[in-house]
Image: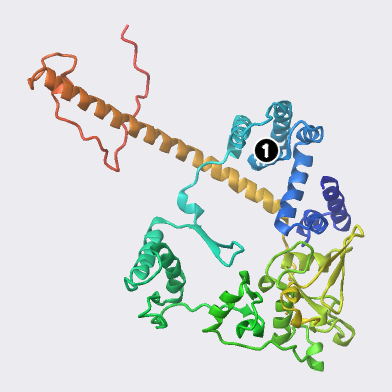
Amino acid sequence: MAELVARRMWDAEAQDPDCGYMIVTGLQRASAEVAAAMNLPPGAASALVCGAHDLDSGFPKVLAVLCAGGTDWRTVQIILKRTKSVGAMSIRAALDARLAAVIGRWQSWSRKRVVNAVDAMVRDLDPDAVAERERAEDNRHFDITPVGNGTAKVDGVLDAESAVIVDGKISDLANGVCPSDPRSMKQRRADALPAMAQGTTLACRCPTCAGTPAPFDSGGVRAVLNLVADRSTMLGEADHPGYLAGFGVIDADQVRRLAVRARLRTLTPPVVTAEDRLRYQPSGAVERIVRLRDLTCRFPGCDRPAERCDLDHTVPFNHLDPAKGGPATPENLKCLCRQHHRLKTFIRGWRDEQLPDGTIVWTSPSGHTYRTVPGGVELFPRIGPLACSEPKPQRRNPTRERARRLARTREKHRTLRPINAARRRLESAHAYEIENRRHRNRRRRTALLMLKHRRTTSPYIRWINDPYEPETLPPDWQPPPEPETADEPPF
């Protein structure tokens, strides 16, 4: 892979010596070929290719140890990840030499142990490259991931205020049904989430209330779902699966349950007039049938949803003379994500041929061929054989952008380091003060028992006569300032 990357980067430089602004860089060209050859999604192929390139260019001695069988790919991945913020090549060379000398002894080490060892070397040579802790609120996210059995996993991180608001609203909706509702509290809370999103109350499922629609709040947000299914499935005559746009395949029972309140539309092959054939932008009916036929990007290994893809003309559209170019018909259109649309449009060597049944035959710059079939035809055979936006060139320089990201990361680490150090000192002083107060209070209780509640006259422990100290600190407590000079020894 590293050799392939070097060749493709050389090809890019041969086309343009200042190739930093190319729409499809050498790394992206190599990633596309690796994805097609290994049937990988774009993200996985890009990570693998970037890892091979970083290892070959930044850690040649570690690469030699890997080739000789002295270490494994998992350890090398950890090294690449933990050293990605290292800046100067001289520091990388020093790290490479150190790591190559010791990683052969890391056999059977746990991941955490390898991470600690690499971080220690990085901290010694380049402290600005060590990741510093950030505030938890900066990691806010909300993800919904299909799990393949008709359900989805919801995962996220919210700030405290938002979490309380969402949790309280879900709890109110879940507790607003009849006591006879057969669902558990966990199930009601899960059902309350879409009700909250749509601005309705949670419908009760007890025998008395079943079938009563939930009141709708006109101020709420309504969601639109696009579902494709066979007519026989909708009528209950068959149990073929359906396809929910943005989610994936769902079973027949879910199809029928969603179709109860749905607005139904029969999908028919679009009629393309002579005028529509010569338009660059296809009609809405053509665009709809192409997206439903393909379901995903048609590049080998890519699984990006068709809803987020461009529509590409297999035979290029002729803007000067539309009659001599590819028509805007389903037989000449396919879904390509923006990355692979640019790759096919701007990089020489990639060729595609669209067959009447929708199959795409791809030919890579190295001469290998790959076939991709429409995903919708496999689910809905009745679709049978059967819009596009021209990608806008952007003046982007990935190399310089990566350098700027690296500089920002290092600056963030440099800024966070004294902040985190001060926080750690404060937490240590806080714990030390609490423990000292508890110790003195214990000594006071013991002294009172031993002296039978009389005050001590000893000049060494007069503090025992003081009242008990609170064992909690106020939020604004600060430790006493450290002395400017060290105390002189008493002797």
Question: Which residue is pictured at 76% across the width and 34% down the height?
Answer: 62
Q: Residue furthest right?
A: 367
Q: Quadrant of residue 287?
A: bottom right
Q: Nearer the viewer, residue 9 or 343?
A: 343
| Side (left or right) of 218 relative to 341 | left
Q: Residue furthest top?
A: 491
Q: Where does the image place residue 411, in percent across and percent down from the top left? A: 57, 44
Vertically, is 417 above or below 350? above
Circle 1: element type? helix
* Residue 142 seen in the figure: no
Question: Which residue is pictured at 49% across the width and 46% down the height?
Answer: 134
| Side (left or right) of 341 relative to 435 | right
Question: Which residue is pictured at 84% across the width and 75% down the height?
Answer: 314
Residue that carries the numbered disc 1 in the rendered image: 79
* Residue 454 seen in the figure: yes
Q: Amino acid at mark 1?
A: Ile
Vertically, is 139 above or below 459? below
Q: Quadrant of residue 328?
A: bottom right
Q: Where does the image place residue 70, in percent across and percent down from the top left? A: 76, 30
Which quadrant: the C terminus?
top left
Vertically, is 205 above or below 159? below
| Side (left or right) of 140 relative to 217 | right
Q: Quadrant of residue 180?
A: bottom left
Q: Where does the image place residue 193, in percent across and percent down from the top left? A: 45, 68
Q: Where does the image place residue 172, in percent across and percent down from the top left? A: 34, 68
How many residues crowd mark 1 within 10 Å: few (<14), some (14–19), many (20+)?
many
